[in-house]
Image (cartoon, rainbow, N blue to C red):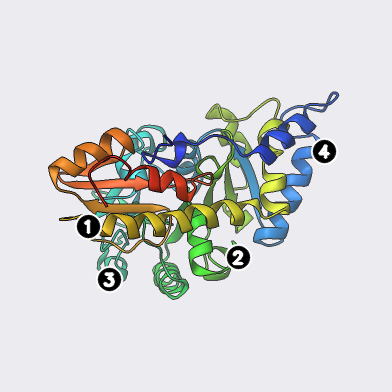
Amino acid sequence: MKSFGSDNHSGVHPAVLTAIQEANTGHQPAYGADSVTEEARRLFRQTFGPDAEVFFVFTGTAANTLALRALCRPFEAVVATSAAHLNEDECGAPEYVAGNKILAFPPVEGKLSLDVIDRLRINPHDPHRVVPRLVTLTQATELGTVYSLDELRAITERAHARGLLVHMDGARLANAAVHLGCELADVTTAVGIDALSFGGTKNGLLCAEALVFLKPDLAPSFAFIRKQSMQLASKMRYLSCQFLPYLQDQLWKKNAGQANAMALYLRERLSQLPGCEIPYPTQANEVFAVLPPPIAKIMQEKARAYAWDGDLHRFVTSFDTMKEDVDALFVGSGTP
């Protein structure tokens, strides 16, 4: 039985394992000076625009936290939703490592409301209070919803008008782009995002994440920050090579498309259960369902569904989830 507890539970896509094997040939310079990493950088510039500067790291927590270190001073604050991964699930790393206070606001279907930016108190002359500096958006959100391109443009324009930068936590960016039917640059560079944590691990890669500065003048010294933060891989090619099939062959789109399709199919099956309610749109690869206790117990055991809040449970599909995996959840469980 495949797990629906998280897309982190899935394995590594065969094409990615092949890329790692192909990179494991001969000797190459260390710390990112190798030809494989240079090719990966070229692909990132091709994907996100000629000004994109990419730095590979091991974890999404590192990408998010080091973005703050690069873009904010310790007395500056980060604006997020209270449900944001950066606020809820980084074990305080942004505060501890970067030293920034997070100003967390209630989400609306997982999203940051535009009026939050208008209501921010920004006074660079008052030393008694932190100064908001960065807005961070999770795309897709923690509730499986997706910011539209118009919503993103409105937020970045309003933020920039107030002197704020905008960071995107793109742990599931591929799923969001597939839902929107657009390319990766359309949902980042084209809408005014300044820096991006680009996730790969949740979509078929192996410990491969990237921090992408879409306006490279923002982080001229980031190479030092990455090293000081213990995220500079000596054998960098084993991280960067994974992005070759991911970007060049558009594996990101194939994998995310499969996961999204299976989430919609799972939503359809869950909606047929007696007493089941699905409170949020399913726009990426997460399905949230309010389940009666007897059914919740079955789904926790069979699907490893995560008890999100009370009777609300989260199901996550992966790149290798198939229809038969979804159907297997409902076999022999007394459910339709």
Residue 159 seen in render: yes
Badge 3 density bin: few <14, some 14–19, many ≥20, Cα 10 Å = few
Question: Which tag, 4 or 1, sits closer to the chain's start?
Answer: 4
Residue 75 seen in render: no
Q: Please say if the residues under marks 2 and 1 sit with CB atoms less than 8 Å apart.
A: no
Q: Please say if the residues under marks 3 and 2 sit with CB atoms less than 8 Å apart.
A: no
Residue at coordinates 57% horizontally, 70% vertically from top-left?
Answer: 190
Question: Which tag, 2 or 1, sits closer to the chain's start?
Answer: 1
Residue 173, image x and y in percent?
50, 55
- Name the residue beneath numbered marker 1: 106
Give the residue type that dot 3 points to.
Answer: Asp
Question: Which tag, 4 or 2, sits closer to the chain's start?
Answer: 4
Q: CA distance from mark 4 to mark 3?
A: 46 Å
- Name the residue beneath numbered marker 3: 115
Frontmost of labels 4 and 3 is 4
Q: Is residue 61 left or right of residue 330?
A: right
Q: CA distance from mark 4 to mark 1?
A: 45 Å
Badge 2 density bin: few <14, some 14–19, many ≥20, Cα 10 Å = some
Residue 218, image x and y in percent?
57, 53
- Name the residue beneath numbered marker 4: 35
Q: Please say if the residues under marks 4 and 2 sit with CB atoms less than 8 Å apart.
A: no
